[in-house]
Image: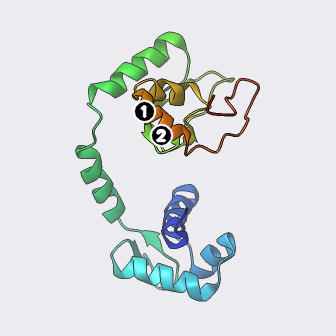
Amino acid sequence: MIVRQAANVLDILEYFARVKKPATLAEIADHFGWPRSSTFNLLTTLAEKGYLYEPRPRAGYYPTPRWLVMAREVAEVEPLPGWTHALIAALSAETGETVAIAAPAGVMAVFIDVVESAAAIRYFAKVGHRVPIHATSSGRALLLQYSKDERDSLYRKIEFKQYNHTTPISIE
């Protein structure tokens, strides 16, 4: 289940990360296909909370550094020890492969740190990318850390879908 309003806020942040310049209400509404009134309400709320500002009057909105400050505060108490990134960077350099650390997120595994290979043909992974926990090597490695009862409980929540010929398609 996705809460649309929360997803819209994140979509706006990702939009600014891609375009890297201020955007008007009309540009944002048109980009997402949102009604202008809803877009206005969302942008106004973000501006009133200190997350957006207008660098020049009527020239568009842009994120304030408040996003970065909050992200840093959250990252400072992240559960991953600092040495883990150096470890996966060294492993990636030694093998030439993309290396990721995944964590369980319900029936998905989410990448919480990634060092991507520089090779032209490689596995593409990004921090925050989610993959089915039962259908991927990273997810299966996580499942091995669960007790049998925990795994069985999780299996009952999975909608088994075949992604390739090796994907499990049932609890059995």
The residue lying furthest to the right in this view is 165
Q: Considering only vertical position in the picture, is 70 above or below 119?
A: below
Above or below, comparing residue 115 to residue 78 in the picture: above
- The residue lying at 52 percent from left, 43 percent from top is 107
Dot label at residue 153: 2
Where in the figure is residue 11, as x and y percent of width and height?
55, 63
- Vertical arrangement, residue 76 with respect to residue 58, above or below: above
> Who's the residue at 37% across and 67% down the image?
64
Amino acid carrying label 2: it is: Ser
Image quarter where the C terminus lies is top right
Percent position (x, y) of residue 6? 48, 68
Secondary structure beneath label 1: helix
> What x and y, as percent, mark residue 19?
58, 60
User: Compared to 67, does 30 lie above or below?
Assistant: below
Residue 102 appearing in the image: no
- What residue is shown with label 1? 149
Residue 128 point in image, percent of width and height? 49, 45
Q: Identify which amino acid the numbered label 1 is placed on.
A: Asp
For residue 53, side relative to residue 137 (left or right): left
Q: Are marks 2 and 1 in contact (CB under 8 Å)?
A: yes
Q: Residues within 10 Å of mark 2 (few under 14, many from 20)?
A: few
